[in-house]
Amino acid sequence: MLLHLCTWPEVEAYLNRSGGIILPIGSTEQHGPTGLIGTDAICAEAIAKGVGEAINGMVCPTINVGMALHHTAFPGTISLRPTTLIQLIRDYITCLAKAGFIKFFFINGHGGNIATLKAAFAETYAHLADLNIANASQVQCQVGNWFMCGSVYKLAKELYGNQEGSHATPSEVALTQYLYPEAIKQAPLADPVSAEHKIYGAADFRRRYPDGRMGSNPALATPEHGKQFYDLAVKELSNAYLEFLNADAKS
Amino acid sequence: MLLHLCTWPEVEAYLNRSGGIILPIGSTEQHGPTGLIGTDAICAEAIAKGVGEAINGMVCPTINVGMALHHTAFPGTISLRPTTLIQLIRDYITCLAKAGFIKFFFINGHGGNIATLKAAFAETYAHLADLNIANASQVQCQVGNWFMCGSVYKLAKELYGNQEGSHATPSEVALTQYLYPEAIKQAPLADPVSAEHKIYGAADFRRRYPDGRMGSNPALATPEHGKQFYDLAVKELSNAYLEFLNADAKS
Amino acid sequence: MLLHLCTWPEVEAYLNRSGGIILPIGSTEQHGPTGLIGTDAICAEAIAKGVGEAINGMVCPTINVGMALHHTAFPGTISLRPTTLIQLIRDYITCLAKAGFIKFFFINGHGGNIATLKAAFAETYAHLADLNIANASQVQCQVGNWFMCGSVYKLAKELYGNQEGSHATPSEVALTQYLYPEAIKQAPLADPVSAEHKIYGAADFRRRYPDGRMGSNPALATPEHGKQFYDLAVKELSNAYLEFLNADAKS
Amino acid sequence: MLLHLCTWPEVEAYLNRSGGIILPIGSTEQHGPTGLIGTDAICAEAIAKGVGEAINGMVCPTINVGMALHHTAFPGTISLRPTTLIQLIRDYITCLAKAGFIKFFFINGHGGNIATLKAAFAETYAHLADLNIANASQVQCQVGNWFMCGSVYKLAKELYGNQEGSHATPSEVALTQYLYPEAIKQAPLADPVSAEHKIYGAADFRRRYPDGRMGSNPALATPEHGKQFYDLAVKELSNAYLEFLNADAKS
Amino acid sequence: MLLHLCTWPEVEAYLNRSGGIILPIGSTEQHGPTGLIGTDAICAEAIAKGVGEAINGMVCPTINVGMALHHTAFPGTISLRPTTLIQLIRDYITCLAKAGFIKFFFINGHGGNIATLKAAFAETYAHLADLNIANASQVQCQVGNWFMCGSVYKLAKELYGNQEGSHATPSEVALTQYLYPEAIKQAPLADPVSAEHKIYGAADFRRRYPDGRMGSNPALATPEHGKQFYDLAVKELSNAYLEFLNADAKS
Amino acid sequence: MLLHLCTWPEVEAYLNRSGGIILPIGSTEQHGPTGLIGTDAICAEAIAKGVGEAINGMVCPTINVGMALHHTAFPGTISLRPTTLIQLIRDYITCLAKAGFIKFFFINGHGGNIATLKAAFAETYAHLADLNIANASQVQCQVGNWFMCGSVYKLAKELYGNQEGSHATPSEVALTQYLYPEAIKQAPLADPVSAEHKIYGAADFRRRYPDGRMGSNPALATPEHGKQFYDLAVKELSNAYLEFLNADAKS
């Protein structure tokens, strides 16, 4: 179920059977010469919808822009500051918790979001505890990073070895190729590309990774790979979500 | 051109020919017993894409959640506080202005966003003026509300008269029916419904408008009407965007 | 009754008969070569006092500085950022609501305040709902813009036609001449002056409207006109305030 | 010169001869059974205008509401939170400093403002240093508390001895009686009243000082005393302002 | 008792006999050519521990960095902005008040902290009043400035006369020499040094006080003096703390 | 070199040879029935001093209170909200970067700080880029978590196996026993204790981990173990710091 395609009475009915919601969060940031700027949001959204269908769960509209300040020296990148993203997450969860949701499962497409999400959860739990909400102390948030799923990681290693890299990776590019075959891009890729993992400020990032890739060779990606990644991620995150929902269920 | 389907070199190339960008902004809020929670975001996004295609302009990912605090007594509504939305808009525009964009055209699907957007623009202009950006003083923001287009308004009056109302209107419901025919909802609608226009806090709103509608009869909506609204809005906002781009062009 | 000339026991007594309060809000900003920098605050304050006398209502001290960032390229202008003004409004209303006030009627002298005020009201309603105040959900805010009163608008059109313009208008200048005849200023006025209505950042504003006026001819103003505007605005806003107080009175 | 009665070209001319400005700041808070809620703003404004006339200096519109959170358990009190007041002061000074003002002399009527004002000055100096303003490092702020003038203090001791107290004092009440003889209030005053000086939260304050006075006997006040206080404060603060303006003038 | 050397059950037991806690707060800022950058934190911490031992009170970990923006033109200085320090103090007190602490005694080593601390207390009282804490209205904060103790001040005058000055004073330097004899520094001291007391922004401060001292001659300091200051401050602040704890005890 | 025991000219001299600084950050939070509330700050501070001595680096005063909101249901815990900690880190780094520091090495004693630190670094890089600081784009921050050092982790596994747990661990308790043998605490420890790793809000945490431990048996700790951990952590983090300093040195 997609929240944006429901009516409010449908949400009310849903809350009678479940307190869980799936929130896709991505980023709008450069992904190298051939990767789509929306890669992280596209992947998170598609997988979240897949999970929602698989286990009949409610899926929130996608948070398209996340924490990508280190990519902002490349045109087209949009980023929230961490403090803005924390307030945004706090606002989302507060609204939904007041309505009765208690289990927030973020399906995340961008490594750079993880730290700020965790900070936001802590800030939000404390905020909710200060309000007069019946279920405040039951609210739980969890992040499921599709690219860190064991099955996804294993396949990426098999297919790409150390050319997977850590940004603008062939695995995420493959997934966008599967989802948007009409937007497969070609461009010459310099070789070799820096394979270090250090991230500081935006100007430093562009100096260090001149075309935006971090040790990756996205030319290896194919739409068929993308489908495989999609299936694996949906399956693994569906299980993770169900486990999250059922935890503490007896207590 | 959809920003999320571009690569950063494509954005760089785009900036050589245009400093304009179209930003759809909606809301995730109750729309009565039969309206979709995502109505405002769905409409803004579709029309923005239509405008982008019509005039070959860049379209930003949709801001799905806006300022809808007054709807938060209905489950499924998510709202940013105005101060959060102001920071979000500031972050979006700052990133894009640093990259070279100067004309920001927001295609808006929700009346409740307008005031906060205007406040955000003022806050952002002043913020940019304090940075060392070459084009800070050229940055201009404008809001195009599709539901306030003259042609849209005229058609709504013709089709629905005073049953158009002011929230969960047949015109916006029609547009979502055209875009998502698979998500047309049926539900009994109480009659008559309050036709006043007063909006205060969330609890007051629900007392005043018990099923979420404000003087509207969305049962009148049809997908065919939706297509008409879509075409009118895309045409009128395309012209508005071009006029905005070309203003001050000679000076 | 002027709040600043009351004692706290008098306020306590007032609250036994009314939960309403009138809050004048203006701006401290350039008003062209002959308009007073305090024009918007002066007008709002005088009319608010007039309304307070007419219907025996409590009048709050004037908020002299509002949202005028677009005028800050002219010396003498002082502006709050929108986020500051939102916090200020939140603080005012929270204090007064805890004391028992529930109907907040802002008499506003500056168009540039409207958007931020509306954003502030939304932010404040949500803030109050999170506190443990008995009357939180009854709090209502409304803006009465004296310059948008139907009777005022009509007279301005009759007297000045399209030389009324939209900033540093003869109508508001006339009102200050009536209130402060000792401060009537003379200066040569360039002709013609830009009559467009576009407002972006401060530097752009000064480029676009070099002497600060927006399409207006304040030389047409007279103190006698000012008295007429004053009487019309007090009468119309007194009625608006009473209507606001009495709305929902039966429910 | 009153800023609100000037035009912007007059301010521009003023800046050619002086970079100084006088900013009255008061409070809107309970002042016992007979003191006016606006006492602190009324006194600060009148004295600031007196100083402005005496030495031909520019006077800013009065900041009517300050930091009075500890008085908020009495109806009619309005307070900014310290963080809001800091932002407000930052906004005022930033606007004025960009226009060329460098010497900010606050004439203060409320002891509770002092700490927050000092914090605000520090915050503002650092903020200005981060902007690209030519005169940022020359900006100086100073607070002149009229009630702490040596001559005022001496007269208060002579007239009232230890019945001067520390809030709702006869000296400040006298000054308001001189300025607003039409608003002299009578009410029975309990005796004795607490003479301690401890201030914590609002509920504690009202428990500790049930009618709002702190060790004072405002029944001793007369309008004639008020005139004496006014004359002394204007004289002493005029000198203080001139000294402030001339300091560092040779360096 | 040092909080950081306690277990939580020990804190729980402590709260059964006392609601008081001592919070040392200093600064990390230049103290002239021979004074330690940590002087204010070192002094506050040592005295707070002494007081804690003397009266068996709980001592919080030291707040090492305070409000020292005016010293930031000298390398090694670290300062919080006032708004950051206010949030920090609010967070400390809120956590401790929820656990049951009600009497917060700050032992302060830096004059520049005082204003912001007072602002923070006001902000915090109001914040606590909005939460649902049983003891919110009993929370009280007080600042004990060791360098303003009567006995300390008297000794400093006796030993150093007007060479005590007001920053990088021989008394505070003496105290750090007593506590850290291994870190006694020697350096030539220019003579005479400015003895004025004006503090504005950081660049201005360094121009005005080129080596960081304000009218002081720290060469007069000895470790033996330091011991005397320590003993006096511990004794006087122990009494002040006990008085603070016992105040209102009967009511 | 300890910053708080230096003078500002010593810092100036240090900056001529190094742009690096070590910042210990801990937490003030419950560590089970026998662990010290200051455990994380104590460990971070001691190891940071050890590293500073080993490689002659500057060590900043310890940030004693970090992000521990999930522990706040136990008395004695103090936590900053993530947004407060982000501002604090931003203030620290901004001051030090303006003075010339560019390499910030945080030695961290608390897992709960990591996410917020990373968010703070991102926020700070972007903030610095907006200032006019020569070295803004060279500023780099890194976190060294002593408890995640390979050598430390290996020893803990050898000594404690799966009784190491993840909070109030024998390894960190051992380190505090080595550093503060006078503060070794004894208390009966329930067995078994929850060994899960889930962390949500504070009330949930206390329900889930009733005595504060997470799967650990701190009774296994000895001061001798503590010395071993200390030596390993100092050695490994000294190397890490040197590597961090030297990275990019050639470019």
Image (tube, coloured by chain):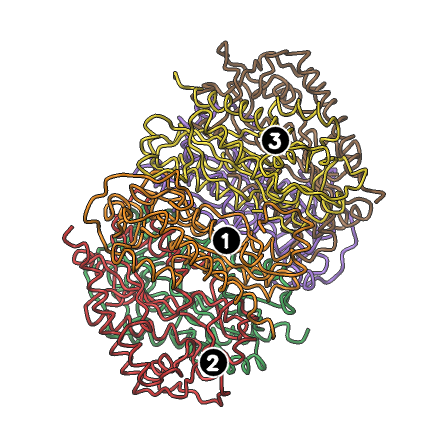
Chain colours: A red, B green, C purple, D brown, E yellow, F orange
**How far from the left and from the top, in percent, is residue D235?**
77, 26
User: In the drawing, does residue A121 fall left or right of residue F190?
Assistant: right
| Residues at marks 3 and 2, CA–CA distance in whole angstroms | 60 Å
Q: CA distance from mark 1 to mark 3?
A: 57 Å
Mark identifier at residue A32? 2
Q: What secondary structure is found at the residue carrying circle 3? A: helix
Chain bearing tag 1 is F
User: Residue D244's image quarter?
Assistant: top right
Q: Can you name the residue that lies furthest to the left here?
A: A250
Nearest to the observer: residue C83 or residue A74: A74
SS of the residue at dot 1?
Answer: helix
Give the mark toward the camera: 1 or 2. 1
Are dots 1 and 2 on a single chain? no
Q: Quadrant of the N terminus of chain E?
A: top left
Q: Are marks 1 and 3 in contact (CB under 8 Å)?
A: no
Mark carried by residue F71: none
Residue marked by disc 3: D41
- Amino acid type shown at disc 1: Gly
Choose mark 3 or mark 2, whichever is in front: 2
